[in-house]
Image (cartoon, grey):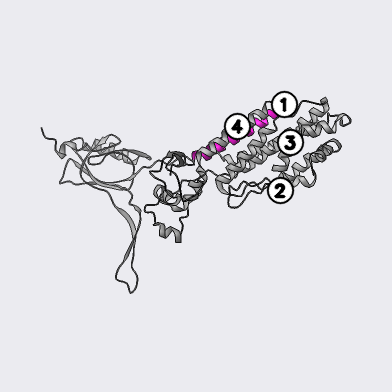
């Protein structure tokens, strides 16, 4: 038996009250504004989005019990809020009742006619709170600095400065001073060498904590559109996500390098050396946290339907928003997580909680940044190509050739060998 269009029609109803629909209409297409200009024969129509799905229909309630069913339908129409409309041609949908009209006709006895208007019932979205992971990292970094300074001052107050040995202090703090020289260059105007650094700690241990307090009071993090404001040496990685990740990764290595000091020497010497190493280590972590906090969660760039030619890009390069490479961010996150965990193992209970809170906030933010980035994939060029040609074939953007060269340490941008290389997924 052949199924006809009549067999596919659904019995019309609203909130379970059935009726007949001889005709119904709903707007389709786009709404817009027609612009007509003086001295111009061709008008311009500006599309302003899809038309609202306002359902208008004629409904009949027919039968000996039409008055009882009429009253039930009126009650359903007068009930506030949305309800389910079964449309014979369009199926089930959630709607809200609009302006309706009811009419009776003595000639057409046993029938009540309705002109119904239904509007789409799009449920309001509940506002969703989004955690500001950047602000959490800044807050936890400030808490870590405060706790670290207090821990240093408390420990140094127990040290008998008369029992400190200059030679032992200098040997124990050589790696710590190397980190200071690399990450906190302004301090070199106070500490000329490791011997002067050790003498300063022996004579005035509060100088170091004062220097760190002053340093971070004027620290402005990492400039995504320029260069780092920290005093660490530049690795040529530039600004943006890549520069921030490189900067933070390099400083993470410094954190791990001074986790412990030499146990040789007297008790006071070892205690003072370890307290100094802990303060410098925490300060580097604070600096990393402030750099990481400048890394925003990226918004995905809109895809370009048609890429311009290489000749056009040479004249007007494509402006592409900066997007992090997820693999790099994840590697930084894991290394930093391990470095903070190792540092927390030798902390007292109070400072351990602060370090753990700092670790969690940094990991959470870097995870969010990584999720907004692009992954790396392995490809093998079919033949030896220039980086420009490879970037244009892969991305349609020849300006991304330096990205291919730097990522894979290509010796010459004109010759990318036909061997497996890593490249961004998009």
Q: What stretch is highlighted in magenta?
A: 349-371
Disc nearest the viewer among 2 and 4: 4
Q: Do the residues labelled 3 and 4 touch (CB within 8 Å)?
A: no
**Left or right of 273, for residue 333:** left
Q: Residue 150 at x, y = what percent?
A: 76, 34
Relative placement, left or right, of 406 versus 418 is: right
* First in sequence: mark 1 vs mark 4: 4
Q: In what quadrant of the picture does the N terminus appear? A: top left
Do tag 1 and tag 4 residues touch (Cβ < 8 Å)? no
Secondary structure beneath disc 3? helix
The residue indicated by pointer 4 is 337
* Mark 1, secondary structure of its residue: loop
Give the mark nearer the N terminus: 2 vs 1.
Answer: 2
Residue at numbered disc 1: 348
The residue identified by callout 2 is 218
Q: How crowded is mark 4: few (under 14 residues within 10 Å), some or many (20 or more)?
A: some
Dot 2 or dot 4, earlier in sequence: 2
Distance between mark 2 and mark 3 Cα atoms: 23 Å
- Categorize mark 2 by other alpha carbons within 10 Å: few (<14), some (14-19), many (20+): few
Q: Is mark 2 on a helix, strand or loop?
A: loop
Determine crowd level at label 3: few under 14, some 14-19, many 20+ residues with C-alpha closer than 10 A.
Answer: many
Circles 2 and 4: CB distance less than 8 Å?
A: no
The residue indicated by pointer 3 is 176
Q: Residue at x 34, y 73 (%)?
A: 38
Q: Where is residue 197 in the image (x, y as percent from the top left)?
A: 80, 39
Q: x, y (%) of residue 365?
A: 56, 38
């Amino acid at each position: 038996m052949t199924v006809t269009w009549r067999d596919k029609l659904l019995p019309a109803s609203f909130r379970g009250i059935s009726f007949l629909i001889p005709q119904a209409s709903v707007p389709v297409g786009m709404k817009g504004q027609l612009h007509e200009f003086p001295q111009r024969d061709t008008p311009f129509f500006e599309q302003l989005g899809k038309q609202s799905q306002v359902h208008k229909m004629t409904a009949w309630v027919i039968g000996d019990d039409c008055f009882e069913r009429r009253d039930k339908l009126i009650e359903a129409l007068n009930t506030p809020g949305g309800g389910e409309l079964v449309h014979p041609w369009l199926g089930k949908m959630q709607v809200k009742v609009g302006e309706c009209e009811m009419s009776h006709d003595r000639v057409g006895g046993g029938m009540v006619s309705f002109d119904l208007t239904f509007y789409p019932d799009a449920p309001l979205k509940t506002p969703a709170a989004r955690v500001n992971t950047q602000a959490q990292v800044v807050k936890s970094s400030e808490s870590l600095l405060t706790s670290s300074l207090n821990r240093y001052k408390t420990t140094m107050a127990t040290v008998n400065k008369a029992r400190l040995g200059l030679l032992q202090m200098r040997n124990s703090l050589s790696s710590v001073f190397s980190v200071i020289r690399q990450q906190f260059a302004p301090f070199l105007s106070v500490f000329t060498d490791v011997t002067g650094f050790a003498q300063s700690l022996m004579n005035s241990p509060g100088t170091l904590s004062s220097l760190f307090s002053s340093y971070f009071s004027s620290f402005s993090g990492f400039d995504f559109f320029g260069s780092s404001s920290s005093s660490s040496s530049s690795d040529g990685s530039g600004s943006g996500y890549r520069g921030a990740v490189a900067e933070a990764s390099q400083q993470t290595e410094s954190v791990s390098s001074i986790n412990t000091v030499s146990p040789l020497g007297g008790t006071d010497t070892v205690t003072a050396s370890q307290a100094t190493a802990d303060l410098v280590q925490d300060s580097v972590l604070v600096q990393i946290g402030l750099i990481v906090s400048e890394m925003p969660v990226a918004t995905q760039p809109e895809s370009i339907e048609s890429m311009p030619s290489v000749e056009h890009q040479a004249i007007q390069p494509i402006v592409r928003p900066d997007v992090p490479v997820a693999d790099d961010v994840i590697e930084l996150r894991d290394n930093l997580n391990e470095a903070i965990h190792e540092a927390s193992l030798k902390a007292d209970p109070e400072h351990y909680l602060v370090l753990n809170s700092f670790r969690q906030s940094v990991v959470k933010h870097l995870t969010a940044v990584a999720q907004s980035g692009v992954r790396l994939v392995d490809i093998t060029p079919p033949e030896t190509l220039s980086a420009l040609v490879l970037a244009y074939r892969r991305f349609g953007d020849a300006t991304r050739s330096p990205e291919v060269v730097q990522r894979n340490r290509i010796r010459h941008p004109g010759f990318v060998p036909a061997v497996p290389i890593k490249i961004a997924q998009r």
